[in-house]
Image (cartoon, grey):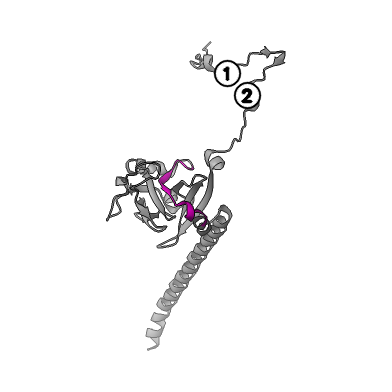
């Protein structure tokens, strides 16, 4: 009879060995295991959002750490994630963000950014170009050049790991920046409204097209009758 192959990792699996220290049973480490342990983002960051509405709505996520560091990411609902990402570049024409350098704890030398400054340009498989904004007034600390070489991986990157850039706002600007962004609840409400409006617009355009097509067909059918009457 065929036998199952031996597991090469079997000797590394945890097996609890009962132990008593000072008359007290030592509990198994598995008793402290938490199945739904909060992620790094849940533990250390607050989620905020920024929606760039032109030329078409595209949402971005700002992960705000308690030490002021912000990770700029694509929101999960960004159109490019659904369409597929074709290319990614930090060369925005007048400057290349990947050439940014900083020194020391104060991150001296970092490029100064406004909330609408372009960090990178992403092109989708539909050949739509998206200028990724910095979302917050800040100083550029670092960009994630991994997406230049492997843009497709950005589509499936875990939350936080798919950051485009790391930026650092001034301490005195943090509260105003947070107020200018959308909270998780505000974002959900606004993005739902945007999607509903887009769906309604599409339905209206479809109805207009159907009406025009029907009118054209009616005109074609009536044309021979009019000619015969003449």
- Residue shown at 34%/42% (left/top)? 103
Question: Does residue 124 sit above or below 17 in this rendering?
Answer: below
Q: Earlier in the sequence, mark 1 or mark 2?
A: 1
In front: 196, or 122?
122
> Does the magenta run of residues contain 43?
no
- Residue shown at 48%/54% (left/top)? 172
> From this viewpoint, which residue is outermost toward the right?
23
> From this viewpoint, which residue is outermost toward the bottom?
230
Label number found at residue 30: 2
Magenta part of the chain = 159-175
- Asked whether the beta carbons under mark 1 and mark 2 sit within 8 Å of each other, the answer is yes
The quadrant of the image that shows the C terminus is bottom left
Label number found at residue 14: 1
Q: CA distance from mark 1 to mark 2?
A: 9 Å
> How many neighbours does mark 2 have within 10 angstroms: few (below 14), some (14-19), or many (20 or more)?
few
Camera sees residue 75: no
Question: Does residue 8 sit above or below 195 in this rendering?
Answer: above
- Residue shown at 45%/70% (left/top)? 209
Image location of residue 23, percent across then percent down: 72, 13
Mark 1: secondary structure: loop
Image location of residue 57, percent across then percent down: 45, 60
> How many neighbours does mark 1 have within 10 angstroms: few (below 14), some (14-19), or many (20 or more)?
few
Label number found at residue 61: none
- Residue shown at 48%/15% (left/top)? 8
Question: Does residue 34 sit above or below 66 in this rendering?
Answer: above
Image location of residue 214, percent across then percent down: 46, 73
């Amino acid at each position: 009879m065929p036998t199952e192959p031996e597991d090469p990792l079997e000797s590394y699996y945890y097996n609890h060995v009962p132990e008593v220290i000072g008359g007290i049973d030592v509990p198994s480490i598995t008793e402290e295991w938490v199945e739904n342990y909060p992620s790094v983002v849940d533990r250390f960051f607050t989620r905020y959002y920024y929606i760039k509405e032109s030329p078409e709505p595209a949402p971005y996520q700002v992960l705000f750490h308690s030490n002021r560091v912000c990770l700029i990411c694509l929101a999960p609902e960004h159109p490019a994630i659904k369409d597929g990402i074709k290319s990614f570049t930090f060369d925005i024409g007048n400057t290349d963000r990947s050439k940014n350098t900083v020194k020391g704890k104060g991150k001296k030398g970092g490029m100064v950014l406004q909330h609408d400054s372009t960090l990178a340009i992403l092109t989708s498989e539909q050949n739509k170009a998206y200028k990724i904004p910095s979302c917050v007034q800040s100083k550029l600390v670092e960009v994630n050049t991994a997406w230049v070489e492997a843009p497709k991986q950005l589509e499936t990157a875990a939350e936080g790991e798919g950051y485009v850039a790391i930026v650092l706002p001034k301490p005195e600007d943090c509260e105003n920046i947070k107020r200018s962004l959308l909270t998780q609840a505000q974002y959900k409400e606004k993005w739902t409204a945007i999607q509903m409006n887009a769906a309604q617009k599409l339905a209206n355009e479809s109805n207009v097209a159907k009406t025009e097509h029907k009118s054209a067909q009616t005109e074609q059918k009536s044309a021979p009758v009019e000619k015969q009457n003449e």
